[in-house]
Image (tube, grey):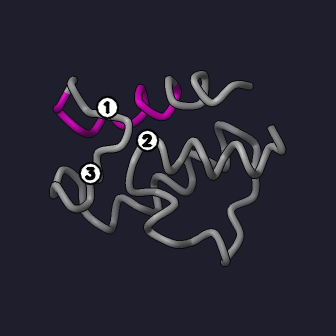
Amino acid sequence: MTPEEIKTKVRAFLLKYIKKPDLKDDEDYFASKLINSLFAMQLVMFVEKEFKVKVEDKDLDIKNFNAIDSISSLVTRKLGC
C-alpha cells in the first residue's frame, strides 16, 4: 500500500466526522479544534482495524495522529513500506 492510498483512506474516515472538505494533509485538526482528544481513540481503532497494524504504547503520541500526513507516516512505518 502506498502512502497516497493510506492518505485517501484516512481522509475518507476523517471526513465522516470533520465537516471540512478542504482539509489539508498537514493540517493539525486537534490544534484547529476540528476534533477533540476523545476522538483520538477512534483514530487509533480505525488505524488498527483498517490497516491491520498494532498501535503500541510508544506510538500513542498525539503527533502520530494529529494530521493525515502523520497518520500516513505511522502506518507506513508499521507496514514496513
User: Which mark identifies residue 29?
Assistant: 3
Look at the picture and state if 57 lies above or below 40. Answer: below
**Numbered label tally:** 3
SS for callout 1: loop
| N-terminal-most mark, 3 or 2 | 3
Which image quadrant is residue 39 in? bottom left
Look at the picture and state if 30 lies above or below 6. Answer: below
- Left or right, 23 with respect to 42, comes to left
Residue highlighted by disc 2: 68
- Left or right, 17 with respect to 54, comes to left
Magenta segment, which residues?
A: 9-20
Depth order, front residue of 52/62: 62
Residue highlighted by disc 1: 16
The residue that appears at 46% across and 57% down in the rendered structure is: 65
Using a 10 Å C-alpha cutoff, classify the residue at mark 2 as few (fewer than 14 neighbours), some (14 to 19) or many (20 or more): many
SS for callout 2: helix
